[in-house]
Image: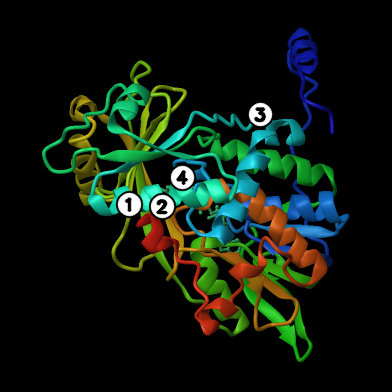
């Protein structure tokens, strides 16, 4: 693979951009792979990349029913933070956040990581106590976050109204090295680097069945024919329940739509991410000037990968008290993704009841930030046959043993 560099741009400019290579190969599937990863979202692609890079396992295929990054990875609002309450979450999310810091250099692909800071508002007494507690827990876990006063918040976000009548801003949890990244670029960067290491990324290839015998998984049925494998890892977010059913077991996940919208572009008004969890809305400004606005998940299970009118109303109504300026903006577009929610709002990374078959899912509304750390930990598990320290707490067993990693009570929302 030719490296991207300032020199390469200058060279290509001089020869009318005729020398660029394709970023990744599009091979036909082989008959057999050592590992098949189902789902070319960020988590599946990162898993394949780290399998090849960290463990030398290159006979890997990533099968994608649509186009890579076309699921939640390309539909999210790109918030990256690691200031979670529970130790297990803090460990994997901080691993991920720290990998994001140098990911552009590692992948030789500009993922536009922007550590502009993430501010989570406290707008009730309950949240005030919760964020203070989380700030202490983060300090113990070695994660840089702090509880900040309303006055400091006004300094950080000039356009905020802290004295709203319903939900005044009482304080906030501030993670200065949280931020955003370009979501498509994360998928494309991992795909390009994985492909360069010999991973086959096969798009338009839907998995329609899981083949198994008495000893465990043997392969998959796809719209491009049967493909054999020694190990299978399903990384399909909102479709996890469907894939599990094909293999004959059930997962404790529910699939719901989560929506977001962007405003028309305006001049720069905010340079951090603000989350208002009590009213269920959050906002940042994209490089193009649009305000990127996200809301809560649907209250009922569904597979509708699109937006709905009542969500625009709900989300904008929630944010308008704290950000009055959005009342004067036009909406440019809205969309939805199918997210996979577990009861404790923590992911599942683990073995399944089928020997040789692994699962990575349950990232729900907050898995973009976890892509590098999750891929790293999932690759370890698939390579070794069992999870190592980062992933071990997130096994399926926790639902049997009642060993929940409860981030739903801790955060109320998990973007
Ligand atoms: C509106 C919205 C806002 C969000 N905001 C944030 C945020 O700000 N910060 C954050 O951290 N997270 C956020 N998230 C969550 C985040 O997007 C997801 O947790 C993350 O992208 C999941 O990545 P993934 O790779 O597991 O899944 P996906 O990106 O959904 O990839 C799964 C892939 O599997 C494929 N697939 C499914 N079934 C099959 C099959 N049978 N055969 C082959 N392929 C199949 C799908 O086509 C898809 O491409 C948000 C999500 C949404 C929808």
User: Which residue corresponds to the image point at 79% horizontal and 17% vertical from the top-left?
Assistant: 8
Q: Does residue 336 show up?
A: no
Along the horizontal axis of the image, is 255 left or right of 376? left
Residue at mark 1 = 129
Count of marks, rendered view: 4
**For marks 2 and 3 on the same chain, the one whose residue lies earlier in the sequence:** 3
**Which of the 4 image quarters holds residue 217?**
bottom right
Could you say whether the residue bearing mark 3 is in a helix, strand or loop?
loop
**Colour option used:** rainbow
Query: Is the residue under label 3 in contact with that under label 4 (CB below 8 Å)?
Result: no
Residue at mark 2 = 133
Q: Is mark 4 within 8 Å of ligand 1?
A: yes
Q: Is mark 3 within 8 Å of ligand 1?
A: no
Residue at mark 3 = 110
Q: Distance between the residues labelled 1 and 3?
A: 38 Å
**For marks 4 and 3 on the same chain, the one whose residue lies earlier in the sequence:** 4
In the rendered image, which quarter contains the N terminus?
top right
């Amino acid at each position: 693979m030719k490296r991207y560099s300032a020199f390469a741009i200058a060279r290509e400019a001089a020869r009318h951009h005729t020398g660029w290579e394709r970023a990744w190969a599009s091979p036909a599937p082989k008959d057999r792979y050592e590992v098949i990863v189902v789902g070319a979202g960020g988590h599946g692609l990162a898993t394949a990349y780290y399998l090849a890079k960290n463990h030398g396992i290159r006979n890997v295929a990533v099968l994608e029913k649509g186009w890579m990054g076309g699921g939640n990875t390309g539909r999210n609002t790109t918030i990256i933070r690691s200031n979670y309450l529970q130790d297990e979450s803090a460990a994997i999310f901080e691993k991920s956040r720290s990998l994001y810091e140098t990911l552009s250099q590692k992948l030789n692909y500009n993922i536009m990581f922007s550590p502009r800071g993430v501010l989570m508002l406290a707008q009730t007494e309950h949240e005030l106590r919760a964020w203070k507690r989380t700030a202490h827990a983060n300090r113990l876990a070695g994660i840089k976050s702090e509880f900040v006063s309303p006055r400091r918040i006004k300094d950080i976000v000039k356009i905020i109204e802290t004295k709203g009548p319903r939900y005044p801003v009482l304080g906030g949890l501030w993670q200065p090295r949280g931020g955003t990244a370009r979501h498509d670029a994360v998928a494309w960067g991992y795909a390009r680097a994985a492909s360069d290491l010999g991973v086959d990324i096969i798009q338009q290839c839907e998995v329609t069945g899981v083949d198994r015998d008495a000893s465990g998984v043997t392969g998959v049925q796809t719209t491009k024919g049967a493909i054999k494998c020694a190990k299978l890892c399903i990384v399909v977010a909102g479709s996890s329940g469907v894939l599990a059913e094909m293999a004959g077991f059930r997962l404790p996940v529910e699939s719901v739509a989560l929506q977001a919208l962007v405003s028309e572009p305006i001049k720069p008004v905010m340079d951090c991410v603000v989350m208002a969890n009590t009213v269920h809305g959050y906002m940042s400004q994209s490089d193009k000037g649009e305000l990127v606005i996200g809301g809560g998940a649907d209250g009922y299970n569904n597979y509708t990968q699109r937006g709905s009118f009542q969500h625009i109303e709900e989300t904008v109504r929630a944010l308008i008290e704290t950000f009055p300026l959005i009342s004067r903006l036009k909406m440019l577009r809205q969309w939805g993704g199918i997210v996979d929610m577990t009861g404790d709002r923590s992911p599942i990374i683990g073995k399944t009841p089928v020997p040789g078959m692994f699962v990575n899912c349950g990232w729900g509304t907050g898995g973009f930030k976890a892509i590098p750390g999750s891929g790293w930990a999932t690759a370890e598990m698939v390579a070794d046959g069992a999870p190592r320290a980062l992933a071990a707490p997130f096994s399926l067993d926790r639902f049997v043993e009642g060993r929940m990693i409860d981030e739903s009570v801790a955060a109320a929302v998990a973007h």
